[in-house]
Amino acid sequence: MPAIKKAIDAGIPVITMGNKVEGGGNYSTLYPDYENMAMVARALGTSLGGEGEVALLVGSRGNFVSDTREKGFVETMAKEFPKITIVGIEPTGWDAAKATNAAQTWLTTYPDLKGIGCISDSLCLAADSVATSMGTDLLYGGYDGDAEMKDMIDSGKMVMDVLTGAYRVGYWNIAVAARLAGGEELPKDLYMPTYFVTSDATAAKLKAGGLSFESINTEKEAVEAKNYTEQLGPKVPASAMTVGK
């Protein structure tokens, strides 16, 4: 806080990246986490026909991003899919080993487990490795848009992912900083434009099940993950730096 205040008092814009920091004048670059994870919950719930047991792998309690994604998932399941039970929510500290342990415990304790939501893709990969080794087929919903998720998405095993993209996130923050340095006015809280990613077949099934959304497939995702200059570069208006929550 003292460092942020010192910079702002000197007329230097400060950006706190990927987390909500009440720094008294700083800009926070965030994601539409609640809304995105709510849609992931809807995709998982719709794929399960609105019934069954699921679990959720989160990051760490007290982290704004993890907490917001957890809230979006849990509240949406409770409100829109009352016949789906969340049997476990496990903080992992973004550690794949902890995600592995949690998944193994759930699969042993809840033999009827049907799906797992993850606030980060690496946690879904870890959970799936356990489920596969135990001969169990689960459905997943994740977040990040990691390239490693392609096979899970294309096979329909991962019903929805959210593309932020590591390179896109980095470019976006630099783009915001450059605009602020150039004197452009931006809101203090900015929410990164993201994409929902599914296979074409999964998208068709979800829409047939009554879910309305726009998505891209993994081929398009591979393009958009590197298309950040066109999406967020100096030729687009300042309004492109953020989306409505």
Image: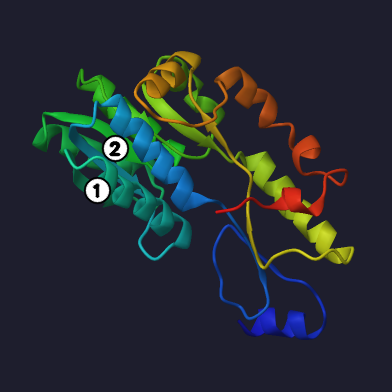
**Residue 201, percent across and down?**
44, 13
Amino acid carrying mark 2 in the image: Thr
**Which residue carries the number 1 mark?**
78
Q: Quadrant of the C terminus?
A: bottom right
Residue at 10% across, 37% down: 109
Residue 119 visible: no
Helix, strand or loop at label 2? It is: helix
Label 2, label 1: how many angstroms apart (C-alpha)?
A: 25 Å
Q: Quadrant of residue 84?
A: top left
Indicate left or right for 159 with 149 as reference.
Answer: left
Please report whichever mark, 2 or 1, sits nearer to the chain's N-terminal start.
1
**Disc 2 designates what residue?**
100
Picture layout, residue 143 above or below residue 245:
above
Label 1: which secondary element: helix
Res 136 → quadrant: top left
Residue 150 percent coordinates (x, y):
50, 21
Q: Position of residue 140 (x, y in %)?
A: 34, 30
Dot 1 amino acid type: Ala
> In which quadrant will I find the N terminus?
bottom right
Tag nearer the camera, 2 or 1 = 1
Q: Is residue 165 left or right of residue 124?
A: right
Could you tell me how many numbered marks the image carries?
Answer: 2
Residue 139 spot, x, y in % from top left: 31, 26
Q: Is residue 228 left or right of residue 52?
A: right
- Neighbor class of circle 2 (other Cα within 10 Å; few <14, some 14-19, many 20+) is many
Q: Is residue 207 visible?
A: yes
Residue at (19% x, 42% y) in the render? 82
| Residue pictured at 67% horizontal, 81% vertical | 3
**Image-quadrant location for residue 232:** top right
